[in-house]
Structure formats: structure tokens, C-alpha cells
Amino acid sequence: MERNLEKIRHFFKADRWASAAGIVIDSANDETVQCSMEIQDIHRNAGGAVQGGAIFTLADLAFAVHCNLELAAGEDRGITVGQSCSISFLKSSRGTRLIACSRCLSRGKSISVYRISISDDLGTPIAEMLGNGFSTVKKG
């Protein structure tokens, strides 16, 4: 199901860390969420490669958006938060943009699992993240 991308973007503007990193939400539907980030000097570590924290932040936002599509679209429900995440860094990027694509592996009442694949604009696989989400129950 296609979601209202502008509503989702508006909701996640409140994620100030990801916004400051320059991450944008490219697309969002029930099957996949894609976020991307232009690589800037601020994203680089002392060795000149993209810093692991910048890659993780990109993957984490794609995960958060996918877990919370209904909430971001204005539906009345609790928020899903990250319960645990595991990331494996595969290669350094030689491109100018990083792209994170989230896919849901399992979604239950309170626990969900997502795989987030990060590549660069040259098609090089950069990292893989597995995220477990925990859905809170809306009170009130």
C-alpha cells in the first residue's frame, strides 16, 4: 500500500539527528522504505571513509520509518522503537550517495524484524543491518 510521503516526511522532520545528517525519505510503502544521504565531508572519518555512525544513522532512519508508517501517516497507534540492531559493514563507498532500503521480514503484534540494505549510488553493497522493533501500546 502506497503511503502519503509528505505526511511521513513531515512526521520524521522531528528526527533532528537524521535531518541534520542530510537524510531524505525517498519512498515509503508497506513493502519497502528507501532513504538516502549525499555523502559530505562531515560524514567522513579520520581515514577519509564514510564513518560507521553515519551509515548506521541512515539505516536506523529507514528502519524507524518502516516500523512507523501508520503512525507517521496519522493513524492512531503507539510508536515502534528499536529493541536491538546489528549492523555489518561490508565495503567503503566510492560513490557520492548512500541508499538504505528496508524490507520487513516479520511483523507481529508487538515485535517486528526488518532487514536494511545499504548501498552506494554505484551499486556497491556497503552494509547490512537487522533491526528488531518493539511496538508500544498507545495509552489513553
Image (cartoon, helix red, strand yellow):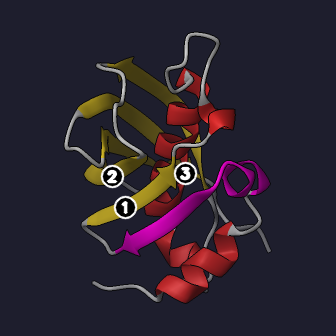
Instruction: List x then y, in percent, for residue 31.
Output: 24, 67
Residue 54, picture quadrant: top right
Q: CA distance from mark 3 to mark 1?
A: 10 Å
Q: Is residue 109 left or right of residue 48?
A: left
Report helix, strand or loop for mark 1.
strand
Please report contact status of discs 3 and 1: CB closer than 8 Å, yes or no.
Answer: no
- Residue type marked 3: Leu
Report helix, strand or loop for mark 3.
helix
Q: Earlier in the sequence, mark 2 or mark 3?
A: 3
Q: Which residue corresponds to the image point at 49% horizontal and 21% vertical from the top-left? A: 49
Q: Magenta stretch?
A: 16-28
Residue 126, picture quadrant: top left
Report helix, strand or loop for mark 2.
strand
- Residue type marked 1: Gln
In this view of the protein, can residue 18 be seen by the observer? yes
The local crowd at label 1, few if under 14, some if 14 to 19, many if 20 or more residues have their Cα within 10 Å, is many
Question: Mark 1 highlights which residue?
Answer: 34
Q: CA distance from mark 2 to mark 1?
A: 6 Å
Please report contact status of discs 2 and 1: CB closer than 8 Å, yes or no.
Answer: yes
Question: Mark 3 highlights which residue?
Answer: 61
Task: Locate the C terminus and report the quarter of the image it occupies.
Answer: bottom right
Task: Locate the N terminus and report the quarter of the image it occupies.
Answer: bottom left
The local crowd at label 3, few if under 14, some if 14 to 19, many if 20 or more residues have their Cα within 10 Å, is many
The local crowd at label 2, few if under 14, some if 14 to 19, many if 20 or more residues have their Cα within 10 Å, is many
Q: Is residue 16 left or right of residue 28?
A: right
Q: Which residue corresponds to the image point at 36% horizontal and 32% vertical from the top-left? A: 130
Residue 102: assigned label: 2
